[in-house]
Image: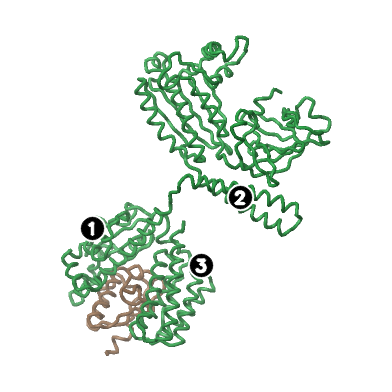
Amino acid sequence: MIGPVETFQTEAREHLEVLENSLLDLEKDASNLELVNRAFRSIHTIKGGAGMFGFNQLTDFTHHVENLLDRLRVGELSVSPSLIGTLLDIGDFIAQLLDDVAFSEEQSLRAESFVTAIGLVMGGATESSEMSMNKGSESKGIGDGDNHLFRVIFTPDKHSYKAGLDVVPILRELHELGKCHVTTKLKDLPDNEEFDSETNYLSFDCVLVTTHDQSVVLDVFMFVIDDWAVNVDEIDLADEDPESDRVGELLVERGLLSQADIKNALAEKSVIGKLLAKSGLVTEEDVSSALFEQDATRQLKKQSQEAANANIRVPASKLDSLMNLVGELVIVQARLNQFATNSDNEEILSIAEELDLLTNQMRDETFGIRLVPIGSTFGRFRRLVRDLSVELHKSIELKTEGAETELDKMVIDKLSDPLIHIIRNSIDHGIETPDERQKLSKPSNGTIFLKAQHAESHVLITISDDGKGLDPEKIREKALSKGIISPNDDLSDEQLQSLIFEPGFSTASQISDISGRGVGMDVVKRSIQELGGKVVLKSNVGQGTDIRISLPMTLAIIEGLLVKVGEEHFVLPLNSVEECIELPENITSSSRHIIVVRGQQIPYISLRDHFDVGGIHPSIEQVVVLHNESERFGFCVDEVVGQYQTVIKRLGRFYEGVVGFSGATIMGDGNVAIVLDPQSIIESTTF
Amino acid sequence: MDAYMTTPFCMPQSLTIYDVAAIQSDVSLNTPRVVSLAATEQIDTSGVQLLLFMYKINKKQDAEFEVVDCNSELAKTLSLFNLPFAVNGHLEEVV
């Protein structure tokens, strides 16, 4: 998104172009007043924009240029080649200033010399000494944060001065709050002997652009609000009525005119501000203040519209397509990297490295686009819990945490159904009825807690309830009756509880409409595994059940560690890798399969043996140490090739049941490397 | 043109509620067109109002009014009011 400051800079450059063209044309056609007007308008707009953004030094400088062009406009000065030359130089100088609006020492001196030159052309001294190059004051103005626009109108009591109440500190405070345009109104100030210098006749009309709210603005008048007439109105920037910020309307809103006055003035078909001022209905100050309010309102409205337009909706299919293209790009990048490494050509290597950096950035940005907060899924569960609770005469509250946790959109979409299954099971089988809960001295309201959080490169989703938990004995009986286990199987409570993930298992003695058809939890587990995730269950009888789902943030591309066994290449997910160590010579991969790392015994398996890869063991083997949530383990390989950006391709339905693989990837040389799922390899292996 | 009017009228060190009444009597009869604040160190809103009064009298006569020799601190205070006359040759706002 282009920020408001950048927009100002771009627009100012366009105005400088208009200025330059106007000046060049003016040199040839000195009598063309329209060209002078055009140049004046360009500088006036740049000045206005600079002022709005609090670039005070630029505002001051352009103010001098504007004065010079004004003299040209009214015919007090005539066009000369030297004047055009000076103005063209000034245009170049302003272009430089746009790049860095904080004046450097050198730029300040240059500005001073231009101001002196302008003074000489105008035939009088200018305020060069007063070029208030207010360093450090550039930050105030429109464009910082969430702006509010206030119309602040106040009239001090006529005895204020004698009472020791001064307007200076009030104005100073208003200026400190943001960009403040003050109009000192002289309408009631006598211009004859009626004037009493100790009586106040002034009133003030301020347009304030600030990030502060109304209470802060009102605080400025804390000590005088009882005695002075103070009016602080916030201007509605959300108002989309194109008529509402017209000068005439603003003057009506300020109570200075009626609609009829506007209509009459407009009948003359000229600039309304000038007409109204001329007709004496309002003063020039009134028009000036209303004009400033109009400018500020329009600029702020434009900014908020730009902010609103900053978000664009893109079909998900386009994002998928972009992701696929990035995946292909990563593969080609790998080819290029390999070619560059083999080529021994420094230039190609350098290009490959640079492109690699860009590809990585592009990959990360593309991921970023696809990440959406999981809270969008949480929302629909609230309704589910409510409806099912009513249906089952249970009182259940759903609590959520971490709704802002981001996950790949595709993962979130596919996660929805498994989560619905789990929540339905909790409501149906887990949480007791209010009567049952009271008998168990539990609060009559049951709670389901849904929590999402980031854990390393994974997202951890926990669904817990305070229901009756899973009874291992009941599960054993059911598993026996379904033939899932045999009477001789000696299973721990945890193993028994995990049986609910087996196909065809159901603990509900009566099948309900909600769940219990025995197709729920095995589908849940499979869906999570398809997403590259894991599901772990912990349950305590009488206390409740915790189901923890760990998911990778994205499915398409992972950072991997490429290893080699014989002629085969394998990729291990880098986020699980802790370190790589050489297998000591006295331990061969066929012996006990335990390696001691800094005093800790770590079990490892040989991938050569596990996948029955042919060939002979190299003299030095490597062990890649990996970790899961609870333990460390190693994979023995021939060679660690290095870090590898892995675009995961599905193996297809034919290999669906194969344990240990999460996909495959195409390497730079066109060969295929298998992407391993370390957790499932460990689970399927007995050390 | 009366020379008195274009010769800068020098304001005293203080241009506040304690001084304005006396100054008003000095400037009422022949209102100067140029006011020098070279000696002025203090000003409050009543002082600013007195300057505006002089501006308005001059404007009635289609004459320009300006303030000169104003130190930077004082100029900063005056700039808070966005005054319609030039201070040190600098006009706050082009209307």
Viewer can see residue A57: no
Residue A99 badge:
3
Amino acid type, residue under disc 1 in the picture: Asp
**Which residue is labeled 1 in the image?**
A227
Q: Are marks 2 and 3 on the same chain?
A: yes
Q: Secondary structure at mark 3?
A: helix
Q: In terms of image quadrants, where is residue A514?
A: top left
**Which residue matches tag 2?**
A329
Chain painted brown:
B
Residue A321 pos. (x, y %) = 53, 47
Q: Amino acid at mark 3?
A: Asp
Counting other residues with Cα less than 10 Å from the Cα at mark 2, is it few (<14), some (14-19), or many (20 or more)? some
- Mark 2 → mark 1, Cα distance in angstroms: 72 Å
Of badges 2 and 3, the one in the foreground is: 2
The residue positioned farthest toward the top in the image shown:
A487
C-beta proximity under 8 Å, tags 2 and 1: no
Neighbour tally class for label 1: few under 14, some 14-19, many 20 plus, Cα within 10 Å: few
Left or right for A196, reference A333: left
Q: Nearer the viewer, mark 2 or mark 1?
A: 2
Residue beneath the point at 46% across and 34% down: A401
Few, some or many residues within 10 Å of mark 3 (<14, 14–19, 20+): few
Could you say which chain is coloured green in the image? Answer: A
- Residue at 40% x, 15% y is A436
Could you tell me how many numbered marks the image carries?
3
- Which quarter of the figure has residue B71? bottom left
Q: Nearer the viewer, residue A199 or A408?
A: A408
